[in-house]
Image (cartoon, helix red, strand yellow):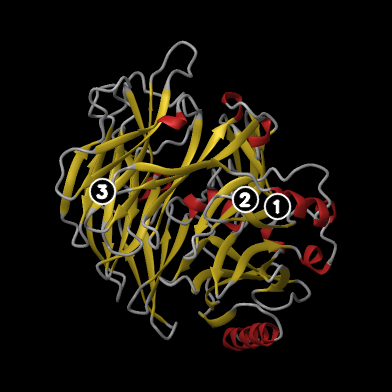
Amino acid sequence: MSGKLMVTCLCALSVLYASAQPSPQIIAQSQSFEEPENGASRLLLMQNGHTLFFHFTPGRGIDVTVYGPDHRQRVVTHANVASWKNRRMRFSELRGIYEINGQAVVFLENQINWQPRLYRFIFDSNNGALLSEKLIASLPGTALFTRTPAVHDNEHSPEFMVRKDPSSDYYAVAMNDLRTRKTGQQLRIRHYSPQHELLSDAPFDLTGSPYKYIDFADMYVQGDTSVLVAAFAYNRNVFQNGDSRLVIGTLPRGGQTFQTSLLEHTARLQIRDVAMKYHPQSGMLYLLTSVRERLLKSSEEFIMRRSFYEDYALLMNIIDPRNLSVKQHYYVAHPQLNRYAKEHLQYRHPYRGVIQDFHLNADGTTQLLFEELEVSEEPYSTTTHTDSTGVVHTTTSANKRYSSRLGEIGIATLDTSGKEINGYAIAKDQQAEANIDIFHIHHRNQSGWTFRDNGDWMNLSGFGSYDFFHANGKDYILYNDVAANTTDTREDYRTKKQVSWFSRTNTVCAVYENGQITKTYLYGAPEARTARFSQLEMITRSKDGKSFATMMIEKTGKKKEARVVWVSL
């Protein structure tokens, strides 16, 4: 069967299957191409109708494929990186990929001469050409001692972070220097216009306060008006859990100093993870945080478990950004989600999934996205891998090897007061050779990637977990699963087969509407010896959230082909 005929048949199958089910509609699929197994890939939907496919290779720079509004391939361009040798791409970290001022802008962090640096790459949205490559931020080189974030216990405090306003093209860069103890040099924020003009540049400090240390947590950009920042403020002592607070601040356009406010109700809480979102209808800022259990009073607040010895509570903080006052704060409880898990998934204990993201609806309700997570580690590992050319690679690592079980999905809906009004769960069982953390989906949708090379080929976490859409009054949940788990109508989580090889899965779309869950296949019903699955970390959404694009991989026997797929909800 020719590639063109295969695509046509697959499109027809998807549409016919979706016509009888409440499934998303496949708009179009690209011509097939070889799956980019090494490096990292991302997609970006542009306002001019183009779609850009970026492949960050381990040693050849950046390849960009441009698809036109008709979803046909227009051009493929290649760009070498001037700021470092191409083979150093594997040491890079993605800090953001956005459309800004009609162009595709990629932010990459790398260490050059032991110095952390942040680079901005600007690509033409019509032909994919690299228009600009510029160093926009740097930090001093490695110090003998670094300031570790012992109080908030977050080992993943970034050195750079980029956030863009979802409603405009203004963006901000955070510089988080863990190498210094000097006040005024630990955290710095820069605010940029859509034309990449610097609007504000100021340190985030707490002059006159009793706190010596500040670490970045998250931030939100309010157009050309201001940048809102959440940070950890603390002191260290011999017990490693000294006095600490969560602090929020706002930097007005053109300002040289932050207006700050300490959240007193977070005193001495060991807050580990923070995610910040803005609700335009109410004008409120939502700050969702995980809290370690040992500093709380009531065990009823421990609703999340990351591993056998890591229990967490979930604290929501609602802030008025105009005066930084706390309008409301509460610990999240989800009794309805617990009840659903017991009645449908046959749980014998409360649901203990960790928070992965949250969604703010226009009516003021909040949807919390949970996932059962169990992380284990080994001190070292030896692995072998046979690449597409038949060459066997053996890798022995002295670093820790992590494995994460990505289990049952839980969705809880809260009203404006924070009370749960609905909850449901979906059974799944996936295994990823990676250290998956709290807010994994939240960070995956904004920055970060799974960069695969010969030393990290087993990390397939980009195909794991799930993604969530709320559109047309329905919830859409996408995840990769084996056919046996979907055809088996039992909801008991013990009956689900574990997925460790995603090349044997198909992408499932679970639609929740009026209390009912309907499962369908995004790419049509499975066929014998054929699997069609998605690289979920590559999902790129339209501005209205009602359509998206991703990369689908079709595997028949030993043959694998990839396609870009455009989907409408």
State the image coordinates of residue 160 (x, y, percent, origin top left).
Answer: 33, 42
Q: Are marks 2 and 1 in contact (CB under 8 Å)?
A: yes
To which residue does mark 1 refer?
Answer: 337
State the image coordinates of residue 165 (x, y, percent, origin top left).
Answer: 32, 58
Nearer-N-terminus badge (2/1): 1
Dot 1 surroundings within 10 Å: few (below 14), some, or many (20 or more)? many
Task: Classify mark 2: helix, strand or loop.
Answer: strand
Q: How many marks?
A: 3
Q: In this view, does 532 lie to the left or right of 451?
A: right
Residue 194 sits above or below residue 22 on the image: above
Q: Which quarter shows the N terminus?
A: bottom right
* Amino acid type at mark 1: Leu
State the image coordinates of residue 337 (x, y, percent, origin top left).
Answer: 70, 52
Q: Nearer the viewer, mark 2 or mark 1?
A: 1
Label for residue 83?
Answer: 3
State the image coordinates of residue 462 (x, y, percent, origin top left).
Answer: 56, 55
Label for residue 304?
Answer: none
Nearer-N-terminus badge (3/2): 3
